[in-house]
Amino acid sequence: MKVEELIKEIGADFYTGVPDSQLKALCNYLMNTYGIDKNHHVIAANEGNCTALAAGYHLATGKVPVVYMQNSGEGNIINPVASLLNDAVYAIPVLFIIGWRGEPGVHDEPQHVYQGKVTCKLLEDMDIAYSVIDKETDIDDICASMKEYRELFAQGKSAAFVVKKGALSYDEKVIYKNDYEMSREEIIRHIVKYTDDDIIVSTTGKASRELFEIREANGQDHSRDFLTVGSMGHSSSIAMGIAINKPQARVWCIDGDGAVLMHMGSMALMGSNKLTNMIHIVINNGAHETVGGMNTVADDIDLTGVAKACGYPNAVCVDSYEDLNKALEEAKNKKELSFIEVKCAIGARDDLGRPTTTARENKEALMSYIAKL
């Protein structure tokens, strides 16, 4: 189905969401049509943020907003859906468009398998009516669903479209880029040179895939690394949990700007605890690159300033390999919590692979390594 047909039948004029590769056609259409426009299209920090923003839109206009997300974001919407939108509370209607990763019977990455299994059940538990859009869905099906949904919206209830892989198409291309030159993979290669035998926790997406391939190219094993394949936004908290309980070890967190924005409160927690054995590196390309390259707001704010305000004793921003090496060396030699923001270009190798070990094997290898420290 052409995404333009879906958009026309929905008839909404406000969209907010967190980008998803399964919804790339929708995301590209919104970027081509509106760009980032607070009146029509907002890419938010996390899915709960989107839901509350959508509620405010409805309160101000009386119209029904659209919130889009990957199904992994369902966990982030449970609280605002149950305690804000639900018709037993404020009865605020929202239309959700949800990319279905980990659909049962369709091969996907391990972090999506269980989430895919419970995607529709979670909607049922939240009292959200839904219909599935697949490659066979046509505009008549959408019209029938929307007729039902409009009756629900009038009662203050929400509804959802669950979108299968390849169900939506969009012919126009969108090129996502910025003005920075350093590549994320090369940045991580520089980081690895300074970490020696230290522990690395890397964020979800391409950063963990690149770390895995760098270890392979170096002939190193993966026992020192925790590749956070899911739980976007929580890598720094995982690293903090390790650092607290292994004070004799140094822990590096390789984070991304979209992930940091998603759960930025963790920075306040780390800054207030001032761990002496943790280095937090945020590779900032101002984009949700792993799911297509759509914008984050990280290029418009001062992440390093946020770190300083949260209490990180050391916080710097770099945009060259020379300055990166200097920052890595200084952080390694200081026994204080350090923050390094690295400005990065958008882009990755077309042949970038995925880890060849399972998530459980990764966990067990790291735990065995940590036990020996």
Image: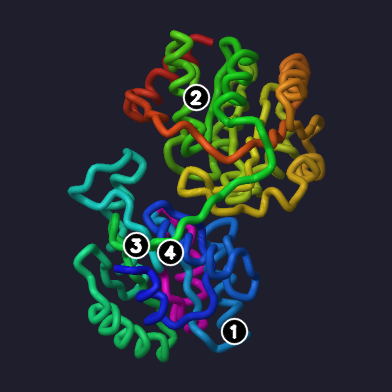
Q: Earlier in the sequence, mark 1 or mark 3?
A: 1
Q: Earlier in the sequence, mark 3 or mark 2?
A: 3
Q: Earlier in the sequence, mark 1 or mark 2?
A: 1
- The residue under label 3 is 169
The location of residue 259, given as percent across then percent down, is 57, 45
- The residue under label 2 is 211
Disc 1 from disc 4: Cα separation: 25 Å
Residue closest to the eye, 47 or 75: 47
Q: Earlier in the sequence, mark 3 or mark 4?
A: 4
Q: Is residue 130 magenta?
A: no
Figure quadrant of the C terminus: top right
- The residue under label 1 is 59
The location of residue 181, given as percent across then percent down, is 66, 33
* Magenta span: 72-96
Q: Amino acid at mark 2?
A: Leu
Q: Earlier in the sequence, mark 4 or mark 2?
A: 4
Q: Is residue 83 magenta?
A: yes
Q: Is residue 335 visible?
A: no
| Disc ID at residue 26 | 4
SS for callout 3: loop
Q: Are marks 1 and 4 in contact (CB under 8 Å)?
A: no
- At 29% from the left and 42% from the top, the residue drawn is 108
Lateral position of residue 252 relative to residue 24, left or right: right
Disc 3 from disc 2: Cα separation: 32 Å
SS for callout 1: helix
